Image (cartoon, rainbow, N blue to C red):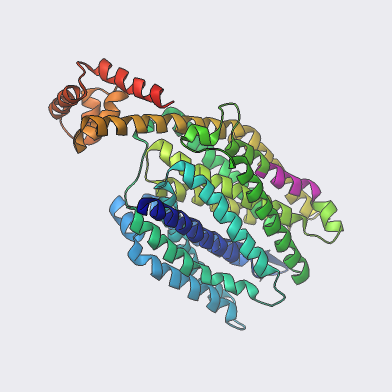
Amino acid sequence: MQVADRDIRKAWASIGGFACNQGFLFAVLYLGSGQSLTLGSGSIVRIELVGLLVCMCLALIAICRASEKVRNIALSTRFLWGYAALLLICSVVPDLVPGAFILPLTFKSIFVGIPLAFLICAWGRALGAMPIERAVPTVFIATAAAAAVCLLVVSLPVDWAYLILYLLPLGSASFLREVSREADLHSSTPVSASSGDESGERISGKVILGTVCYGLATGLMETLVTTSTVRVSMGFTVTFFLLVAFCLSSLQLFRGVKIARVREFFGDVSAGPLDSVYRLAFMVMLAGFLFVPALNSFGMLGESVVLAGYLSMLTVLMSVFVIVSRLRGHDAVLFFAKGFAALFAGELLGLVAGNACRYIPVASESLIAIAIAGLVVLYSYLFLFTDRDVRELTVVVAEADFFEEACLRIVETFGLSKREAEILPLALRGRTGERIGQELFISKNTVDTHLRRIYGKCNVGSRQELIDLGEKIQEEMR
């Protein structure tokens, strides 16, 4: 009973904390007043977003390139309150400084962008430590909650109401510490069966390229948003209403599914909830591109539909980041950092391209930006990261999950030691003694000694019999 209560408490802490993180991310990147920097006869719009994205990209790249020790220290629970305090103070203060412009923007870009990147990666590690069948719904439920809170705040008839959302990092840090107490989030939980898998390498590359394209299209659209306070407020209301509707619709695909295995969670090979959700996010985004002129003629921001589609796509991509990191056997924070770096880099490129389109000497420069953004999204969906890739990704992870469970069952049933448990999955994958020694940094003779002990404990006489045992257990689980 205590274990069940602890699991429920941890699940709610994960949802509440990640919702706080998502809500603050929406607030700092997409709410508030867009600012412009005048240069001669022209201007650069959304200059505040450019600075934030640059700092976040640099921080995410630094996390990827840092050593494991440095990364673990930077993302440890002891710094979470420090990051939360920085985000709160440095988000509010620049907006309250009258008159000044460049200095507050630079201050906010650095001291909000960097800690926010660290907090995002800390949540990536937390999600990666969960079973996939719980991590994916957590992302969707938390995003729906965050969008609902943002919808409530932007609906308030009070200027600067969005500043309330700047308190959310405190909740994010608090819940993340609670989750950290329940599990060791400073070590990866890889699917060793799929480490170096060719399909994982191929799909992960397509995920990154597709993510860049979606970010680029969104950056293009963000340069078109009008500065009219009434219309922007209406646009954000539409955005978050559609995002809540998307998340609720997505969760309906998971409702009623008894989640005992990842394969059951994702459904049949031919169709599954996650690739259906991916199609739904794409349709929302594409609808925005198609109906921008029509919606604008009715006084509604058509770009808000695109932003809703983008945030919906972001929700799907975050789930994919967790799945890919598990598939490749890496610490989840690495691919989470790479994925968000690709997303923000694409968005930054889109902002640059969108500002460049403003200087095109034609009357319909906004339509050119919309057309380019729509084509980029369509190309990404059809040729880079398709719904078939999402389906293949989930199926491969399902197979890897069966393999991992089979390894755990063998370890527990036959009482293998810690080192033998490390060698077992590599042996079941047919790795040679030399290859196993190289991967675990031990000699071939040591590997052979451990293999003989594994054979003895498992009552098998050869490597092939051990592989047969693993396959038999996997079939029984299926």
Whether 137 is among the magenta residues is no
Residue visible at 39% across and 31% down?
Answer: 194
Q: Position of residue 21 (x, y in %)?
A: 51, 61
Q: Main secondary structure of the magenta part?
A: helix
> Farthest residue in the right direction?
297
Q: Position of residue 19 (x, y in %)?
A: 53, 59
Quarter that holds the C terminus? top left
Mark yes or no: residue 347 visible.
yes
| Above-or-below relation of 261 to 160 | above
| Above-or-below relation of 465 to 346 | above
Does residue 311 appear left or right of residue 305 in this picture? left
| Above-or-below relation of 74 to 405 | below
| Above-or-below relation of 198 to 358 | above
Q: Position of residue 307 (x, y in %)?
A: 68, 54
Residue visible at 64% across and 66% down?
Answer: 31
Q: What segment is highlighted magenta in the picture?
A: 281-291
Q: Position of residue 295 (x, y in %)?
A: 82, 55
Residue visible at 51% across and 45% down?
Answer: 136
Residue visible at 69% across and 77% down?
Answer: 158
Mark yes or no: residue 58 visible.
no
Closer to the camera in the image, 362 or 472: 472
* Snapshot quadrant of residue 299: bottom right
Does residue 207 appear left or right of residue 454 in this picture? right
Does residue 168 appear left or right of residue 80 in this picture? right
> Farthest residue in the bottom direction?
98
